[in-house]
Amino acid sequence: MGRWLALSLALDLVTCFLHSPEIPRSNATILAFGDSLTAAGAGSIPYGVFLAEILGVRVEVLGVWGETSEHRGLAHLLLGRMRQRFVSFHGARAPSDLPDVVLLLGGTNDLSQVPLADTISSVKAMHELAASWGAVVGVLALPRFVNPKVGSARKLFAANHALAELEQNYSFPSFFVNLSEVSSRHLYDGLHFTSDGYLIMAEMIAQKVWHWL
Ligand SMILES: *[C@@H]1O[C@H](CO)[C@@H](O)[C@H](O)[C@H]1NC(C)=O
Ligand SMILES: *[C@@H]1O[C@H](CO)[C@@H](O)[C@H](O)[C@H]1NC(C)=O
Ligand SMILES: *[C@@H]1O[C@H](CO)[C@@H](O)[C@H](O)[C@H]1NC(C)=O
């Protein structure tokens, strides 16, 4: 009972908003999908908001807060969320409203408890889902964290290596951004970034994305 309650609470904590830039340069839409690192929090401005302003495109920030609350991990729950999101695109909107680029940042919450292969397989399924909708897929490496409860540096390294290899294997349009290059000086709680850190993330992502817009 307690477990299910925790699960449903975790699922309810979804931050979702569409940020339109002050100076629009294109009608493209980017979907920034992920966990609490995407949602930001504690007053930090999410990277998606900076990205919208840098590129002049709309960015929908969709971050699901949660801990690892089922044995297959948060990444697996995110996959379910993403399917729901795409069902809503399909049902209610014109194809031109589909996102042009989908950025995915997921897997950090699973590092300490879920086998890496399971997390990577959920993340891969999300990439393939986004690609099936015609979106360019941004494979975002897990950012560096310093809270030992989240996982070890070795696991972080292994996860990012696997993500980079996944991206190299894709035959659909995709790119990889190594967010572990952002210094841990910009973390406020050992895991989540301050606005400064999110601005650096957005600049790194923008450098890769603009080719595709
Ligand atoms: C966005 O789309 C509208 C309607 O199709 C068009 O009038 C406008 O010029 C487009 N804006 C940009 C920046 O491409
Ligand atoms: C990502 O960057 C970190 C820090 O610079 C580096 O140690 C790691 O090897 C890089 N990972 C990949 C997959 O490029
Ligand atoms: C990428 O492709 C190679 C060669 O087909 C394969 O050995 C490897 O397991 C693949 N990596 C991932 C992460 O899927």
Image (cartoon, rainbow, N blue to C red):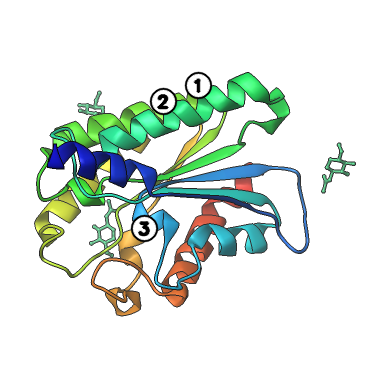
31 vs 158, left or right, is right
Give me the residue at 69% from left, 32% from top: 97
Q: Position of residue 81 (x, y in %)?
A: 40, 33
Circles 3 and 1: CB distance less than 8 Å?
Answer: no
Q: Is the C-beta separation of discs 3 and 2 under 8 Å?
A: no
On-image quarter of the N terminus: top left
Q: Which mark is residue 132?
A: 1
Residue 160 spot, x, y in % from top left: 25, 49
Three-letter amino acid code at the position of disc 1: Ser
Q: N-terminal of the two: label 3 or label 2?
A: 3
As measured in the structure, the alpha-carbon distance from the residue carrying label 3 to the one carrying label 2 is 22 Å
Q: Position of residue 173 (x, y in %)?
A: 51, 32
Farthest bottom residue?
185
Callout 1 touching callout 2 (CB < 8 Å): yes
> In this rendering, does residue 178 appear at all?
no
Residue that label 2 marks = 128
Q: Is mark 2 within 8 Å of ligand 3?
A: no
Q: Secondary structure at mark 2?
A: helix
Of the numbered discs 3 and 1, the one sitting upstream in the chain is 3
Kindly state the secondary structure of the residue where label 3 is placed.
helix
Q: Which quadrant of the render holds ligand 2?
A: bottom left
Where is residue 199 drawn, in percent x and y?
A: 50, 70
Q: Which residue is mark 3?
A: 37
Q: CA distance from mark 1 to mark 2?
A: 6 Å
Asked where in the image residue 144 lies, by quadrant, the reply is bottom left
**Above or below 53: residue 66:** above
At a point 27% along the width and 33% down the height, the residue shown is: 76
Question: Callout 3, which amino acid?
Answer: Leu
Dot 2, how many residues are within 10 Å of its Cα: few (below 14), some (14-19), or many (20+)?
Answer: some
Determine whether 78 is above or below 32 in the image: above
